[in-house]
């Protein structure tokens, strides 16, 4: 039986009923050539993309999760490359599904497009900023002018009242620039800064990862900045950030931050699901294992009952140090990184340097004590 650990909001850390975040890659078409692109995006749309009718059927199935519905993040490629994007947004909103958009910063992302999407019901915008200067950012994005368009889109979205999340790659190429990016963002009106710790998949296989020791130092640096940042700081594919934040809070005799606590247990396949442009369902966009296809099977059935999702939610099946870790319920390691490195999605996360003592594996998780 899978563990159930109550965290501060009263939700279980086992998200077996519905995902919190549902990422929908409506197309792989994109006019950028990002060196770390998970989707290995191409300029033109795929012939097997879900049609508008199939997409409407999929959204009706999402509603069948029941309240609270997952937050739908429409992504790509570049979702603006689909001419029926606005129809898809309106249909999702009609079904009562909260919607955010993760577009590419290309000339297609205009102030008028943002205004129309906001009017249609898009609540938030997710943009990528991988460098503090145009030279740094544009080099990773493979297109001149991308930095300027990103900064402009941040300002335009904020003026519209959209909630803005900025995503930043953490790799050997960007590590030294993170403090400069943080300083740049503190002057902007954003709600959340999410740092994506590189997974060597897609074109990202060509980039250099940071070391486990650098990852640990980065998490401590983020936890320090999070105490006073004017926005929430979060991590993507680095759930061990929760361990760092929790242990620091315990040592200081204070509560762990609510933004960190709300993420307890959420990881690939547990609170997260991904639907590709052709309808394939995976635990995340960075873990290319397929549970089924929404053309044939309900997203609800795939998320709740597929063997892949079931295995990934059972932390007792994890191997290596992740299987012995007292933080495995709130963290669980990156299943995508384990798979990318070893071919085993239940293996240990190779980027986490934490070495749990055998004795620690038998004690009750600190997460159960910190709010007792």
Image (cartoon, rainbow, N blue to C red):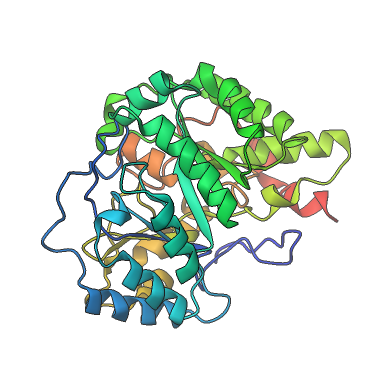
* 41 w.r.t. 66: above or below: above
Residue 333 visible, this orientation: no
Q: Quadrant of residue 356?
A: top right
* In the image, farthest residue toward the top: 176
Residue 315 horizontal/vertical position (percent):
52, 54
Q: Is residue 311 left or right of residue 243?
A: left
Give the camera-side residue of 163 and 194: 163
Q: Is residue 266 left or right of residue 22?
A: right
Residue drawn 65% across the image and 31% down it? 222
Give the camera-side residue of 100 and 23: 100
* 318 w.r.t. 83: above or below: above
- Count every numbered label the image shows and give the total: 0
Residue 223 horizontal/vertical position (percent):
70, 33
Residue 246 horizontal/vertical position (percent):
73, 41
Residue 218 horizontal/vertical position (percent):
60, 25
Q: Is residue 359 left or right of residue 181?
A: right
* In the image, farthest residue toward the right: 253
* In the image, farthest residue toward the front: 112
Residue drawn 77% across the image and 36% down it? 227
Q: Quadrant of the N terminus?
A: bottom right
Give the camera-side residue of 225 and 348: 225
């Amino acid at each position: 039986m899978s563990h159930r650990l109550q965290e501060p909001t009263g939700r279980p850390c086992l998200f077996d009923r519905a995902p919190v975040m549902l990422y929908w890659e409506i197309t792989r078409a994109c006019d950028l050539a990002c060196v770390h692109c998970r989707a290995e995006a191409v300029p033109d749309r795929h012939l097997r993309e879900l049609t508008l009718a199939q997409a409407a059927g999929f959204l009706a199935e999402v509603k069948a999760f029941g309240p609270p519905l997952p937050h739908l993040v429409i992504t790509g490629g570049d979702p603006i490359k689909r001419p029926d994007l606005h129809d898809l947004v309106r249909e999702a909103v009609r079904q009562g599904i909260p919607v955010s958009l993760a577009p590419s910063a290309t000339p297609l992302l205009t102030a008028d497009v943002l205004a129309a999407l906001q009017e249609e019901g898009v609540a938030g915008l997710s943009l990528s900023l991988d460098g503090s200067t145009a030279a740094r950012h544009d080099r990773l994005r493979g297109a001149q002018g991308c930095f300027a368009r990103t900064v402009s889109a941040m300002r335009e979205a904020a003026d519209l009242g959209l909630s803005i999340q900025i995503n930043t790659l953490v790799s050997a190429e960007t590590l030294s620039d993170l403090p400069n990016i943080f300083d740049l963002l503190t002057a902007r009106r954003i709600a959340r800064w999410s740092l994506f710790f590189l997974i060597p998949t897609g074109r990202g296989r060509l980039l250099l990862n940071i070391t486990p020791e650098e990852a640990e130092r980065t998490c401590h640096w983020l936890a320090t900045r999070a105490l006073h940042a004017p926005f929430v700081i979060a991590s993507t594919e680095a759930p061990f950030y929760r361990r760092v934040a929790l242990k620091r809070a315990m040592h200081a005799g204070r509560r762990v931050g609510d933004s960190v606590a709300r993420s307890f247990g959420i990881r690939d396949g547990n609170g997260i699901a991904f639907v590709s442009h052709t309808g394939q369902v995976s635990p995340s966009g960075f873990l290319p294992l397929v549970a089924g296809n929404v053309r044939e099977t309900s997203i609800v059935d795939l998320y709740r009952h597929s063997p892949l999702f079931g295995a990934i939610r059972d932390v007792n099946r994890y191997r290596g140090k992740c299987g012995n870790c007292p933080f495995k319920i709130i963290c669980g390691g990156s299943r995508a990184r384990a798979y990318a490195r070893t071919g085993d999605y239940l293996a240990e996360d190779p980027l986490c340097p934490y070495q749990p003592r055998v004795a620690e594996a038998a004690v009750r998780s600190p997460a159960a004590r910190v709010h007792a």
